[in-house]
Image (cartoon, rainbow, N blue to C red):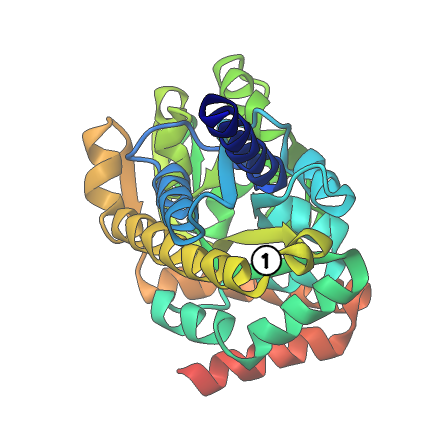
Amino acid sequence: MLKQAILTAGLAGLGLTVAAAAQAETIRYAHFQPAALDQPKHAAALAFKSHVEAATGGSVTVEIFPASQLGGGSEVMEGLQLGTIQLGVVHDGPIGSSFPPFQVFQIPYVFPNQSVAWEVLDGEYGTRVAEAMREQTGIRLLAYADNGIRHFTNDERPVESPADMEGLKIRVQPSPVFQRLVESLGASPTVIAWPELPSALAQGVVDGQENGVTNILAADLYENQDFVSLDGHVYSLHAYMMNDAFFQGLDEAEQQAVLEGIEIAKWIHRGMTAAQDANAQTILSEVGMQVTPLSPDQVAAFRDKAQGPVAEWVAGEVGQEWVDGLFTAVESAQ
Protein backbone atom coordinates (compact mmCIF):
# COMPACT_ATOMS: atom_id res chain seq x y z
CA MET A 1 0.00 0.00 0.00
CA LEU A 2 2.83 2.39 0.90
CA LYS A 3 4.54 1.72 -2.43
CA GLN A 4 1.27 2.39 -4.26
CA ALA A 5 0.75 5.64 -2.35
CA ILE A 6 4.24 6.88 -3.18
CA LEU A 7 3.74 5.98 -6.84
CA THR A 8 0.39 7.74 -6.93
CA ALA A 9 1.82 10.87 -5.31
CA GLY A 10 4.75 10.85 -7.73
CA LEU A 11 2.49 10.61 -10.75
CA ALA A 12 0.31 13.38 -9.37
CA GLY A 13 3.37 15.59 -8.92
CA LEU A 14 4.53 14.80 -12.43
CA GLY A 15 1.12 15.75 -13.71
CA LEU A 16 1.32 19.11 -11.99
CA THR A 17 4.78 19.71 -13.44
CA VAL A 18 3.63 18.87 -16.95
CA ALA A 19 0.56 21.06 -16.55
CA ALA A 20 2.70 23.99 -15.36
CA ALA A 21 5.08 23.54 -18.28
CA ALA A 22 2.17 23.40 -20.69
CA GLN A 23 0.90 26.73 -19.37
CA ALA A 24 4.24 28.51 -19.78
CA GLU A 25 4.16 31.37 -22.27
CA THR A 26 6.79 31.51 -25.01
CA ILE A 27 7.98 34.77 -26.53
CA ARG A 28 9.29 34.34 -30.07
CA TYR A 29 11.72 37.27 -30.31
CA ALA A 30 12.85 38.37 -33.79
CA HIS A 31 15.62 40.74 -34.79
CA PHE A 32 17.91 41.05 -37.83
CA GLN A 33 21.46 41.53 -36.52
CA PRO A 34 23.92 38.61 -36.29
CA ALA A 35 23.93 36.44 -33.17
CA ALA A 36 27.07 38.02 -31.73
CA LEU A 37 27.66 39.89 -28.48
CA ASP A 38 29.19 42.86 -30.29
CA GLN A 39 25.83 43.45 -32.02
CA PRO A 40 23.56 45.76 -29.96
CA LYS A 41 20.33 44.01 -30.88
CA HIS A 42 21.60 40.59 -29.90
CA ALA A 43 23.30 41.69 -26.69
CA ALA A 44 20.03 43.38 -25.71
CA ALA A 45 18.00 40.31 -26.64
CA LEU A 46 20.12 38.03 -24.45
CA ALA A 47 19.73 40.42 -21.52
CA PHE A 48 15.96 40.51 -22.02
CA LYS A 49 15.76 36.72 -22.10
CA SER A 50 17.85 36.36 -18.95
CA HIS A 51 15.80 38.88 -17.00
CA VAL A 52 12.33 37.70 -18.06
CA GLU A 53 12.96 34.02 -17.52
CA ALA A 54 14.50 34.65 -14.09
CA ALA A 55 11.88 37.19 -12.99
CA THR A 56 8.96 34.93 -13.95
CA GLY A 57 10.49 31.73 -12.60
CA GLY A 58 10.20 30.18 -16.04
CA SER A 59 6.49 30.90 -16.54
CA VAL A 60 7.61 32.95 -19.56
CA THR A 61 10.37 31.63 -21.81
CA VAL A 62 12.11 33.52 -24.60
CA GLU A 63 13.27 32.08 -27.94
CA ILE A 64 15.53 34.48 -29.84
CA PHE A 65 15.57 34.40 -33.65
CA PRO A 66 18.45 36.65 -34.87
CA ALA A 67 19.69 37.45 -38.37
CA SER A 68 16.23 37.71 -39.99
CA GLN A 69 15.46 34.04 -39.34
CA LEU A 70 11.75 34.87 -39.18
CA GLY A 71 11.88 37.16 -42.21
CA GLY A 72 12.63 40.79 -42.97
CA GLY A 73 11.05 43.81 -41.35
CA SER A 74 7.77 43.59 -43.26
CA GLU A 75 7.35 39.91 -42.38
CA VAL A 76 8.07 40.60 -38.71
CA MET A 77 5.54 43.44 -38.64
CA GLU A 78 2.94 41.10 -40.14
CA GLY A 79 3.84 38.40 -37.61
CA LEU A 80 3.45 40.89 -34.76
CA GLN A 81 -0.02 41.80 -35.97
CA LEU A 82 -1.06 38.16 -36.40
CA GLY A 83 0.52 37.08 -33.12
CA THR A 84 2.80 34.47 -34.71
CA ILE A 85 5.72 36.59 -33.49
CA GLN A 86 5.32 37.91 -29.98
CA LEU A 87 8.23 40.39 -29.83
CA GLY A 88 10.14 42.03 -32.67
CA VAL A 89 12.80 44.71 -32.97
CA VAL A 90 12.34 46.40 -36.33
CA HIS A 91 13.86 49.50 -37.91
CA ASP A 92 11.93 52.54 -39.00
CA GLY A 93 11.35 51.74 -42.70
CA PRO A 94 9.03 48.73 -42.36
CA ILE A 95 7.32 50.29 -39.34
CA GLY A 96 6.39 53.33 -41.43
CA SER A 97 4.87 51.06 -44.07
CA SER A 98 2.61 49.41 -41.46
CA PHE A 99 1.97 52.52 -39.37
CA PRO A 100 2.47 55.66 -41.53
CA PRO A 101 2.85 58.25 -38.72
CA PHE A 102 6.14 56.60 -37.78
CA GLN A 103 7.58 58.16 -40.94
CA VAL A 104 7.91 61.48 -39.11
CA PHE A 105 11.06 60.14 -37.47
CA GLN A 106 12.65 59.80 -40.91
CA ILE A 107 12.52 63.51 -41.64
CA PRO A 108 16.21 64.39 -42.08
CA TYR A 109 18.38 66.50 -39.78
CA VAL A 110 15.74 66.75 -37.00
CA PHE A 111 17.63 65.54 -33.91
CA PRO A 112 20.91 67.34 -33.11
CA ASN A 113 22.12 64.53 -30.82
CA GLN A 114 21.11 61.40 -28.91
CA SER A 115 20.21 63.29 -25.73
CA VAL A 116 17.54 65.33 -27.47
CA ALA A 117 16.27 62.30 -29.38
CA TRP A 118 15.92 60.18 -26.24
CA GLU A 119 14.06 62.94 -24.41
CA VAL A 120 11.57 63.28 -27.26
CA LEU A 121 11.12 59.54 -27.72
CA ASP A 122 10.74 58.78 -24.01
CA GLY A 123 8.45 61.76 -23.51
CA GLU A 124 4.89 62.72 -24.34
CA TYR A 125 5.37 62.75 -28.11
CA GLY A 126 6.88 59.26 -28.23
CA THR A 127 4.08 57.99 -25.99
CA ARG A 128 1.47 59.51 -28.29
CA VAL A 129 2.99 57.75 -31.31
CA ALA A 130 3.07 54.44 -29.43
CA GLU A 131 -0.55 54.66 -28.31
CA ALA A 132 -1.73 55.50 -31.83
CA MET A 133 0.18 52.48 -33.16
CA ARG A 134 -1.41 50.18 -30.59
CA GLU A 135 -4.89 51.43 -31.42
CA GLN A 136 -4.45 51.18 -35.19
CA THR A 137 -2.40 48.00 -35.54
CA GLY A 138 -2.73 45.92 -32.38
CA ILE A 139 1.04 46.22 -31.89
CA ARG A 140 2.29 47.59 -28.58
CA LEU A 141 5.38 49.79 -29.01
CA LEU A 142 7.31 49.18 -25.79
CA ALA A 143 10.50 51.18 -26.38
CA TYR A 144 12.57 53.11 -28.89
CA ALA A 145 16.25 52.30 -29.39
CA ASP A 146 18.97 53.48 -31.75
CA ASN A 147 19.54 52.07 -35.21
CA GLY A 148 22.47 54.43 -35.57
CA ILE A 149 22.91 57.91 -36.97
CA ARG A 150 22.80 57.42 -40.72
CA HIS A 151 25.56 58.55 -43.09
CA PHE A 152 26.08 58.30 -46.85
CA THR A 153 28.69 55.92 -48.23
CA ASN A 154 29.75 55.24 -51.82
CA ASP A 155 32.54 53.78 -53.92
CA GLU A 156 32.93 56.72 -56.33
CA ARG A 157 34.14 59.87 -54.52
CA PRO A 158 34.16 61.84 -51.27
CA VAL A 159 30.92 63.72 -50.62
CA GLU A 160 31.26 67.14 -48.99
CA SER A 161 28.22 68.93 -50.40
CA PRO A 162 24.85 68.10 -52.01
CA ALA A 163 26.47 68.75 -55.40
CA ASP A 164 28.73 65.73 -54.81
CA MET A 165 25.64 63.53 -54.53
CA GLU A 166 24.47 64.26 -58.06
CA GLY A 167 24.50 61.25 -60.33
CA LEU A 168 25.14 58.68 -57.59
CA LYS A 169 22.89 55.61 -57.39
CA ILE A 170 22.07 55.19 -53.69
CA ARG A 171 20.43 52.16 -52.11
CA VAL A 172 17.55 53.00 -49.79
CA GLN A 173 15.40 50.81 -47.57
CA PRO A 174 11.78 50.14 -48.60
CA SER A 175 10.55 53.55 -47.48
CA PRO A 176 9.24 56.37 -49.68
CA VAL A 177 10.63 58.93 -47.22
CA PHE A 178 14.20 57.79 -47.88
CA GLN A 179 13.55 57.83 -51.61
CA ARG A 180 12.54 61.48 -51.40
CA LEU A 181 15.51 62.31 -49.19
CA VAL A 182 17.96 60.94 -51.75
CA GLU A 183 16.12 62.58 -54.66
CA SER A 184 16.14 65.97 -52.90
CA LEU A 185 19.95 65.77 -52.77
CA GLY A 186 20.25 65.07 -56.51
CA ALA A 187 21.03 61.33 -56.34
CA SER A 188 19.03 58.39 -57.67
CA PRO A 189 17.41 56.10 -55.06
CA THR A 190 17.14 52.34 -55.57
CA VAL A 191 15.07 50.25 -53.15
CA ILE A 192 16.95 47.11 -52.06
CA ALA A 193 16.04 44.89 -49.13
CA TRP A 194 18.59 44.70 -46.31
CA PRO A 195 19.61 41.04 -46.84
CA GLU A 196 20.39 41.79 -50.50
CA LEU A 197 22.43 44.95 -49.90
CA PRO A 198 25.95 43.46 -49.57
CA SER A 199 25.67 41.59 -52.88
CA ALA A 200 24.13 44.62 -54.60
CA LEU A 201 27.14 46.73 -53.57
CA ALA A 202 29.58 44.01 -54.60
CA GLN A 203 27.96 43.70 -58.03
CA GLY A 204 27.79 47.45 -58.61
CA VAL A 205 24.00 47.58 -58.79
CA VAL A 206 24.27 50.81 -56.80
CA ASP A 207 27.15 53.17 -56.07
CA GLY A 208 26.37 53.68 -52.43
CA GLN A 209 23.96 53.41 -49.53
CA GLU A 210 23.18 55.07 -46.20
CA ASN A 211 23.37 53.48 -42.75
CA GLY A 212 24.79 53.91 -39.28
CA VAL A 213 28.09 52.50 -38.07
CA THR A 214 26.46 49.44 -36.46
CA ASN A 215 24.91 48.26 -39.70
CA ILE A 216 27.96 49.10 -41.81
CA LEU A 217 29.95 46.79 -39.55
CA ALA A 218 27.26 44.11 -39.15
CA ALA A 219 27.01 43.50 -42.90
CA ASP A 220 30.65 44.29 -43.78
CA LEU A 221 29.43 47.03 -46.11
CA TYR A 222 32.83 48.72 -45.91
CA GLU A 223 34.27 45.93 -48.08
CA ASN A 224 32.62 47.51 -51.13
CA GLN A 225 32.39 51.16 -50.04
CA ASP A 226 35.47 53.38 -50.07
CA PHE A 227 34.00 56.68 -48.91
CA VAL A 228 31.76 57.76 -46.04
CA SER A 229 30.51 61.28 -45.26
CA LEU A 230 29.46 61.88 -41.67
CA ASP A 231 26.42 64.02 -42.47
CA GLY A 232 24.13 62.30 -39.91
CA HIS A 233 21.03 62.85 -42.01
CA VAL A 234 18.64 60.62 -40.04
CA TYR A 235 18.65 59.53 -36.42
CA SER A 236 17.47 56.04 -37.25
CA LEU A 237 15.35 54.00 -34.89
CA HIS A 238 14.67 50.47 -33.82
CA ALA A 239 11.38 49.87 -32.05
CA TYR A 240 10.75 47.12 -29.51
CA MET A 241 7.23 45.92 -30.29
CA MET A 242 4.97 43.21 -28.91
CA ASN A 243 1.66 41.77 -30.05
CA ASP A 244 -0.76 43.62 -27.78
CA ALA A 245 -3.15 40.68 -27.28
CA PHE A 246 -0.21 38.55 -26.12
CA PHE A 247 0.91 41.24 -23.66
CA GLN A 248 -2.63 41.63 -22.31
CA GLY A 249 -2.80 37.84 -21.82
CA LEU A 250 0.15 37.85 -19.42
CA ASP A 251 -0.55 38.20 -15.73
CA GLU A 252 0.48 41.38 -13.92
CA ALA A 253 3.80 39.99 -12.67
CA GLU A 254 4.71 38.68 -16.12
CA GLN A 255 3.86 42.02 -17.72
CA GLN A 256 6.09 43.77 -15.21
CA ALA A 257 8.94 41.38 -15.96
CA VAL A 258 8.56 42.07 -19.69
CA LEU A 259 8.56 45.85 -19.17
CA GLU A 260 11.64 45.64 -16.93
CA GLY A 261 13.39 43.43 -19.48
CA ILE A 262 12.59 45.86 -22.27
CA GLU A 263 13.99 48.77 -20.26
CA ILE A 264 17.24 46.85 -19.70
CA ALA A 265 17.43 45.88 -23.37
CA LYS A 266 16.71 49.45 -24.52
CA TRP A 267 19.60 50.98 -22.62
CA ILE A 268 22.05 48.25 -23.62
CA HIS A 269 21.00 48.75 -27.24
CA ARG A 270 21.16 52.54 -27.04
CA GLY A 271 24.48 52.57 -25.22
CA MET A 272 26.28 50.23 -27.61
CA THR A 273 24.95 51.98 -30.72
CA ALA A 274 25.62 55.49 -29.40
CA ALA A 275 29.20 54.53 -28.54
CA GLN A 276 29.76 53.39 -32.11
CA ASP A 277 28.20 56.57 -33.48
CA ALA A 278 30.40 58.73 -31.26
CA ASN A 279 33.49 56.95 -32.56
CA ALA A 280 32.37 56.70 -36.19
CA GLN A 281 35.44 58.40 -37.67
CA THR A 282 37.90 56.12 -35.86
CA ILE A 283 35.92 52.91 -36.37
CA LEU A 284 35.29 53.39 -40.07
CA SER A 285 38.85 54.57 -40.74
CA GLU A 286 40.18 51.42 -39.11
CA VAL A 287 38.21 49.20 -41.51
CA GLY A 288 39.70 51.05 -44.49
CA MET A 289 37.13 53.70 -45.37
CA GLN A 290 38.04 57.28 -46.27
CA VAL A 291 36.01 59.30 -43.76
CA THR A 292 34.83 62.85 -44.48
CA PRO A 293 33.63 64.69 -41.36
CA LEU A 294 31.29 67.58 -42.17
CA SER A 295 31.22 70.95 -40.42
CA PRO A 296 27.94 72.41 -39.10
CA ASP A 297 27.82 74.71 -42.13
CA GLN A 298 28.27 71.79 -44.50
CA VAL A 299 25.51 69.82 -42.75
CA ALA A 300 23.28 72.90 -42.97
CA ALA A 301 23.67 72.85 -46.76
CA PHE A 302 22.32 69.29 -46.82
CA ARG A 303 19.51 70.25 -44.41
CA ASP A 304 18.48 73.19 -46.57
CA LYS A 305 18.13 70.93 -49.60
CA ALA A 306 16.40 67.97 -47.98
CA GLN A 307 14.46 68.74 -44.82
CA GLY A 308 11.74 70.95 -46.30
CA PRO A 309 10.74 68.70 -49.22
CA VAL A 310 10.74 65.56 -47.08
CA ALA A 311 8.78 67.16 -44.22
CA GLU A 312 6.21 68.48 -46.69
CA TRP A 313 5.79 65.03 -48.22
CA VAL A 314 5.45 63.35 -44.82
CA ALA A 315 2.84 65.90 -43.72
CA GLY A 316 0.83 65.14 -46.85
CA GLU A 317 0.90 61.43 -45.99
CA VAL A 318 0.26 61.44 -42.24
CA GLY A 319 -1.03 64.90 -41.35
CA GLN A 320 0.65 68.19 -40.51
CA GLU A 321 -0.05 67.71 -36.80
CA TRP A 322 2.39 64.79 -36.55
CA VAL A 323 5.15 66.82 -38.20
CA ASP A 324 4.48 69.97 -36.17
CA GLY A 325 4.31 67.90 -33.00
CA LEU A 326 7.75 66.43 -33.64
CA PHE A 327 9.42 69.76 -34.32
CA THR A 328 7.76 71.27 -31.22
CA ALA A 329 8.94 68.35 -29.07
CA VAL A 330 12.49 68.71 -30.39
CA GLU A 331 12.50 72.45 -29.72
CA SER A 332 11.27 71.86 -26.16
CA ALA A 333 13.94 69.22 -25.54
CA GLN A 334 16.84 71.44 -26.64
**Whether residue 234 is situated above or below residue 175 in the rendered picture:** below
**Residue at (57, 24) in percent of width and height:** 69
Instruction: Find residue 262 and report its image quarter.
Output: bottom left
- In depth, the one of 301 and 320 nearer the eye is 320
- Residue of label 1: 106
Asked if residue 22 lies left or right of residue 159, the reply is right
Corner quadrant of residue 225: top left
Give the side of residue 261 with respect to residue 176, left or right.
left
Classify residue 279 as left or right of residue 105.
Answer: left
> Which one is in front, 256 or 280?
256
Q: Residue furthest top?
A: 203
Asked which secondary structure carries label 1, the reply is: helix
Where does residue 8 sit, x and y in percent of width and height? 55, 28
Q: Who's the residue at 54% across and 66% down the image?
A: 304
Residue 54's spot in the image, x, y percent? 37, 48
- Percent across and percent down for residue 253 are 51, 62
For mark 1, does the 10 Å Cα neighbourhood hold few (<14), some (14 to 19), or many (20 or more) residues? many
Q: Mark 1: which amino acid?
A: Gln
For the residue pair 109 and 48, the one nearer the viewer reads as 48
